[in-house]
Image: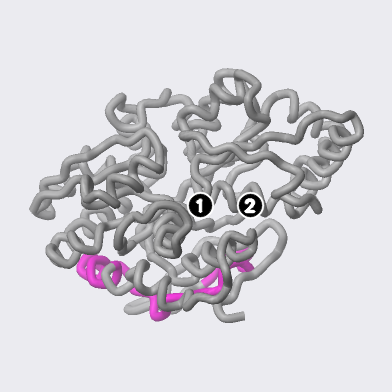
Amino acid sequence: MNLTLAYNPLNDAALILVAEALGFYDSEGLSVTLSREANWSNIRDKLAYGLIDAAHILAPMPFAAALGQGPSMGRIIAPMALGAGGNSVLVSAALKRALEAEDEALKSLRGSAKLLAREVAKRRYAGAGRLVFAVPFTFSPHHFVLRHWVAAAGLDPERQVQWVVAPPSRLANMVRDGLIDGFCSGSPWPQTAELNGDGEVLFSDPDFWTLKPEKVLGVRTDWAEANPDGVIALVRALLRAAAWAHGLSHQDDLIRILARTSYVGAAAEAIAAAMADGGAGLILDPQTATFPWISHAKWFLGQMVRWGWLSPDHDFDALARRIYRPDLWREAAGGLGLNLPLADEKDEGGQGSEWLLPAQPADIVMPPNALFDGGVFRCGS
């Protein structure tokens, strides 16, 4: 069974890359051609025109497209997530110095937000321009993270910050050249910029949300309908890759795989920095970080409403369930012996320590699931 699978060169494409490197596609009866893409727009457009069959995509992308926010991707389903976390926010050395007057406050997101508000006020008083932050795509978790942080500072993200969209691998150079003051992107590009002396990582996903949703596997619905066994085989191959990549004993090999020129193609040192404790917090555990939660879908849709990009007058539950397919995850994961969540939704936030998720045949020990501001998102509330 043949398919073309696209990815953006980031650490969180790990499952897609590991599955090829270790032969998991072949062993599931799949002949997969990988397509390395420079940016998210390329992936969106190739999905729309049927040039690729599936892809590593930003979780909000198919919802935005389905609701007329930007060009359509065509009909897409997401049968699994590709991990959790993995992003960092990098700021220029100049901005970091400006925020460092009260170092104690920089140790928390709430504190850094207050210092950000102070810096914006100083710039306005001096007649200087707005701070410029970049993200890899408008409808992206990166954009939502930065907007949430800016809003926590009491600032208006629309009027008091300027936004730029650029490919992840270009962002480090834009900081170095003074074109932007900072960016949020997937690793290893913030770590690359920091190692090159072009800026400093200010915070990472675990600081914002300890179990933050990020990328999903997007599959063209027409390919999925024509190849139902192929979808299950693809999810199985990626879950097997996740089981391997999650193992601590394989981390050095994982870094070497990602560093290949044909894969992520970044310095192994930058990839390792992102993967280390205290780094970007990428979680690849097949049991706790790959289920396509309907509550994640609704959180993303809620963010679009929050920032005025979308009217609340939609059947978000129906849309979420049309695109996110927990049923397909369960079918693939059950055959691999994973525990299957009993529900499709959960509270997002509010869990500051390990907790038990009801599942069959055994409950799942979940990692903390907490947002920096203490918020809890409950579907329907």
Can residue 252 be spotted in the picture? no
Magenta segment boundaries in residue numbering: 329-355
Toward the viewer: 278 or 154?
Answer: 154
Task: Indicate which disc residue 139 carries.
Answer: 1
Neighbour class for label 2 at 10 Å: few (<14), some, many (≥20)? many
| On screen, residue 148 above or below 169 | below
Label 1 residue SS: loop
Q: Position of residue 135 (x, y in %)?
A: 55, 40
Q: Nearer the viewer, mark 2 or mark 1?
A: 1
Q: Is residue 289 left or right of residue 237?
A: right
Query: How is this picture coloured?
Result: one colour
Amino acid at pointer 2: Phe
Q: Earlier in the sequence, mark 2 or mark 1?
A: 1
Question: In which quarter of the view is residue 262 placed?
Answer: top left
Q: Position of residue 159 (x, y in %)?
A: 74, 47
Total number of numbered discs in the rendering:
2
Residue depicted at x 50% and y 34%: 166
Q: Is residue 176 left or right of residue 236?
A: right
Q: Is residue 147 visible?
A: yes
Residue annotated with mark 2:
208
Give yes or no for contact between labels 2 and 1 (Cβ–Cβ under 8 Å). no
